[in-house]
Amino acid sequence: MFDPTFCTLCPRACGADRTKGVGFCGAGEKIKIARAAPHFWEEPCLSGTNGAGTVFFSGCPLHCAYCQNEKISKDAFGKEVTPERFTKILFELKAAGVHNIDLVTPMHFAPQIRAAILPVKQALGIPVVINTGGYDSPLQLSYTEGVADIYLPDYKYCDAEGAAAFSSAPDYPEVAERAIREMVRQVGAPVFDENGLLLRGVLVRHLILPGRRKESIAAIERLSRLFSPDKILLSVMSQFTPRPGALPPLDRRVTSFEARSVVDRAAALGFRGYCQQRSSAKEEFVPAFDFTGV
């Protein structure tokens, strides 16, 4: 069970007293949000025509060196909201016509989210997406079972060296693989509606990093050994955007050759899904974290 006075919720198990301060993730005891609004830049099966109803949570247990959302992930910028306000935000998004509720980096608030959503899930009436970096513990996932209709995890690395270098989490590969297995167990194979919108299932994302083409191919191959193509969808992303002052290899965009190599390998392995183009490697695709909808 989650103990906010000695937090071991996520794989970091930092032991922080979240009733008095924050954990490694930057989160205290109360839900903290930076933005809640329709978002049109998720995969087509999520964004559709009306957008996904994204709720961006503050804090993150990974602190990746290349994170585009560092303002909210590492700096934990956001506004604390009551459970009642959080629930109201979900229904405001539904009223805006979104196709789903897309909870972005929410797992350090998994117990609070479960308590808020389960009583109203039937009335909400649209799929709930758990959009996560993949670094999720069995305890966290026990709280989202029955809440999540769709899981949208990253699978960032299959090598401990890369995970340590870029996310300070050498255990990331085994943690993420175990987490994705549990996600598939909970929600099953992908199910779409008549308009091609995803209603249920697991859509795994992999971001290609510059200079790591071989490691990305290895990650895709690892996924193919763990999951048959009919069990998960795959989104290969090549829109990596260098941050100002970044050091090699993170100081450049992914090349066309790097992107095509990984996408071609995913296709050859029989994965269904999506590839996000290099042309989306622009800062304007990152939403403004300005308390919209909060």
Image (tube, grey):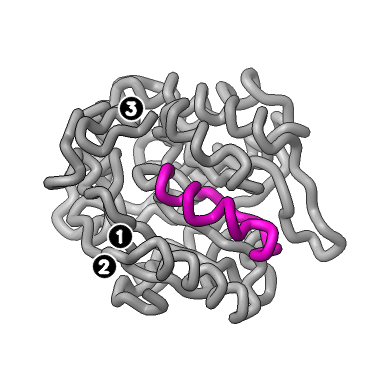
Residue under the image location 48 percent in, 58 percent down? 278
Task: Assign a secondary structure to mark 3.
Answer: loop
**Residue 70 in the image: above or below residue 269:** below
**Residue 92 in the image: above or below residue 269:** below
Number of other residues with Cα within 10 Å of mark 1, as a class: few under 14, some 14 to 19, many 20 or more: many
Number of other residues with Cα within 10 Å of mark 2, as a class: few under 14, some 14 to 19, many 20 or more: some
The amino acid type found where label 3 is placed reads: Pro
Q: Nearer the viewer, residue 80 or 44?
A: 80
Residue 247, position in %: x, y?
17, 45
**Residue 263 in the image: above or below residue 113:** above
- The residue identified by callout 3 is 11
Q: Main secondary structure of the magenta part?
A: helix
Residue under the image location 25 percent in, 56 percent down? 70
**Residue 183 in the image: above or below residue 50:** above
Kindly identify which numbered label has been placed on residue 79.
2
176 horizontally vs 247: left or right: right
Quick check: marks 1 and 3 in contact, CB under 8 Å? no
Residue 85 visible? The answer is: yes
- The residue identified by callout 1 is 32
Which of the 4 image quarters holds residue 157?
top left
Gap between marks 1 and 3 measured at Cα: 20 Å
